[in-house]
Amino acid sequence: MDYMNEYRSKLRTPEEAVSIVKSGDWIDYATNLAFPELLDAALAKRVDELKDVKIRGNLIFKPLRTVEADPKREHFIYNSWHCSAYERKLCDEGLCNFIPMIFRNLVPYYRHFLTVNVAMCAACPMDRHGYFNLSVASGVAKGILETADVVILEIDEQLPRVCGGFGQAIHISDVDMVVEGEHAPLPTVPLHPATEEDRAIAREIMPLIPDGATLQFGIGGMPNVLGSMLVDSDLKDLGMHTELCSDAYVALTEAGKLTNARKNHMTGCGVTGMAFGTEKVYEFVDENPGVAFMPLEFLNSPGVIAQLDNMISINNCIAVDLFGQVSAESVGTRQISGTGGQLDYLTGAAMSRGGKAFICMTSTYREKNGTLRSRIVPTFNGDIVTDPRSQAYYMVTEYGMVNLVGRSTWERAEMLISIAHPDFREELIRKAEENGIWIQSNKR
């Protein structure tokens, strides 16, 4: 069947497509590389015509013209589910508001509670069957588009065409308008060089990863450090089940370490919902039948994760308090990133037979003025709790690793202080004593 006539009948310029937007509408930009930059730029040109247009997106790497055209937020109000470095800057400038969520719940939020008047999403060119591949945004894009009153696709010829289990494509019959235009090469996320602290943390984790383990790596530098060590290890037949496919998985595949052969669920296939990183990541997922993109509401379900034996979840955090609460998304009330899927995998990996959930951090960081601060703190003061103390498992710094499972408040305090930077331990002990979580027999 020839779908080109229907395609041509729905083809619009960006300006024609965004003319449908009305004051007060809710607009959605999906996520990461699905950001519809041509449509956003066209909508920005209508800044003086519109009022109170609310926009949702997340992990956007390119400039949002709608936001930058309206510094007083009288016309466009941008909101993010998970901040990229660019969106973090917008939050700092008062130009973005954060929306709390856990990634597995994102699409159900849309389905049951939220309004989307117009959804705009970048996608691959239509195939001969009338389908548009949703590429590296497949984890959430289809579910968002299905809830929208109007669906506009922006064709981005740069996007990789991904394989999937389900949810990776939308048919022309479900699309209202299509926009074409030229796009620059896809934005990349550079690899950061490993520090000695990163390598020390990775060395703590390595002995606890068995042959045949299935791996989830969160966002940050630690996954690539650990991936390099796994490449040089004797481990074999590792698997991938992760919301984000990054460079670490590419390196493991090229080294013959990542085969997915011993996964007892979705055997033989690496599974993900999103992908970004260097150009090698986009080349890796392009038309690769060994990588299946699936909706995050399935992929990140703790019940699904728990079916994978020896599920290893490795994520970063910003700080932990002596009670075991973890903040992975804010410094005080300043939004840095988002909950994302960290709690999904922390829960699922802990339920897995042989599974382990690691939260990693360097013991200290420096403020802009050079002041050294501890990431292990007595109590939080406005910091957003990403993982509750009831779900704190393995905590790792360059000074060691502790497992907080089943530990009382005084045990947690002692264990966490043991992996804090030595310069801060006495002060942490004093605060633990003040808070009644230190006993006479604790080790100093």
Image (cartoon, rainbow, N blue to C red):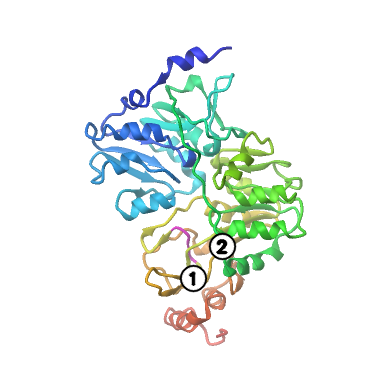
Work out how far the residue at label 1 is from the one at label 2, CA to CA, in angstroms. 15 Å
Q: Which residue is mark 1?
A: 323
| Callout 1 secondary element | loop
Q: Which residue is mark 2?
A: 359
Viewed as shown, does residue 284 lie left or right of 323?
A: right
**Above or below 235: residue 419:** below
Pointers 1 and 2 in contact (C-beta within 8 Å): no
Specify which label sits upstream in the sequence, 1 or 2. 1
Viewed as shown, does residue 236 lie left or right of 429?
A: right
Q: Amino acid at mark 2?
A: Ile
- Of tags 1 and 2, which is closer to the observer? 2
Residue 362 lies within the magenta run: no
Q: Which residues are magenta?
A: 325-329
Residue 327 lies within the magenta run: yes
Residue extending farthest bottom: 440
Task: Give how far across and how far down residue 263 sits, in percent.
Answer: 73, 47
| Callout 2 secondary element | strand
Depth check: 387 or 239 in front? 239
Q: Amino acid at mark 1?
A: Phe
Name the residue: 40% across, 75% down.
Answer: 371
Task: Give how far across and how far down residue 202 sits, in percent.
Answer: 63, 65
Task: Give how far across and how far down residue 200 sits, in percent.
Answer: 62, 69
Q: Quarter of the image holding residue 120?
A: top left
